[in-house]
Amino acid sequence: MAESQIELEKNRVKQRDRFGELLPGLKGALNGLKDEVYKDGVLSVKIKRLMSLAIGLRAGCRACILSQTMSALEA
């Protein structure tokens, strides 16, 4: 049976939230860095997310692919 991408995404979000509970200071710092990297500039947020998706696909990182896909769709 094929894995549900929606269930995998829910699990990824659950693990991310747990990380934030265990290490709130580190999670806050990482979020600040992410917010700075993905703000509009010379390249739009959408383009940056699509570039990150391409990198995740090349790396074969399932969590990266799910995260960047969701973020690109939101952008």
Image (cartoon, grey):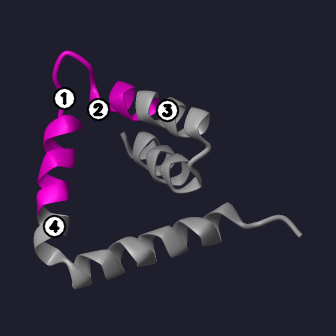
Magenta span includes 65: no
Of the two numbered discs 2 and 4 in the rendering, the one whose residue sits closer to the viewer: 4
Q: CA distance from mark 3 to mark 1?
A: 19 Å
Residue 65 lies left or right of residue 3; in this view the side is left
Q: Residue at x 83, y 64 (%)?
A: 2
Mark 1 or mark 2: whose residue is earlier in sequence: 1
Q: Are marks 2 and 4 in contact (CB under 8 Å)?
A: no
Tell me where residue 69 appears, x and y as whole percent. Answer: 51, 45
**Considering the image in quadrants, where does the N terminus appear?**
bottom right
Q: Are marks 1 and 2 in contact (CB under 8 Å)?
A: yes
Residue 45 image label: 2
Q: Are marks 3 and 1 in contact (CB under 8 Å)?
A: no
**Considering the image in quadrants, where does the C terminus appear?**
top left
Mark 3 or mark 4: whose residue is earlier in sequence: 4
Q: Secondary structure at mark 2?
A: helix
Q: Nearer the viewer, residue 45 or 16?
A: 16
Residue 27 lies in quadrant: bottom left
Q: CA distance from mark 2 to mark 4?
A: 23 Å
**Mark 3 surroundings within 10 Å by alpha-carbon count, few (fewer than 14), some (14 through 19), many (20 or more):** some
Residue 26 image label: 4
Q: Nearer the viewer, residue 23 or 5?
A: 23
Q: CA distance from mark 3 to mark 2?
A: 15 Å
Tell me where residue 56 appears, x and y as whole percent. Answer: 52, 40
Mark 3 or mark 1: whose residue is earlier in sequence: 1
Q: Residue at x 19, y 56 (%)?
A: 30
**Mark 1 surroundings within 10 Å by alpha-carbon count, few (fewer than 14), some (14 through 19), many (20 or more):** few
The boundaries of the magenta stretch are 29-50
Residue 72 image label: none
Question: What residue sits right under mark 1 in the picture?
Answer: 40
Residue type highlighted by circle 4:
Leu
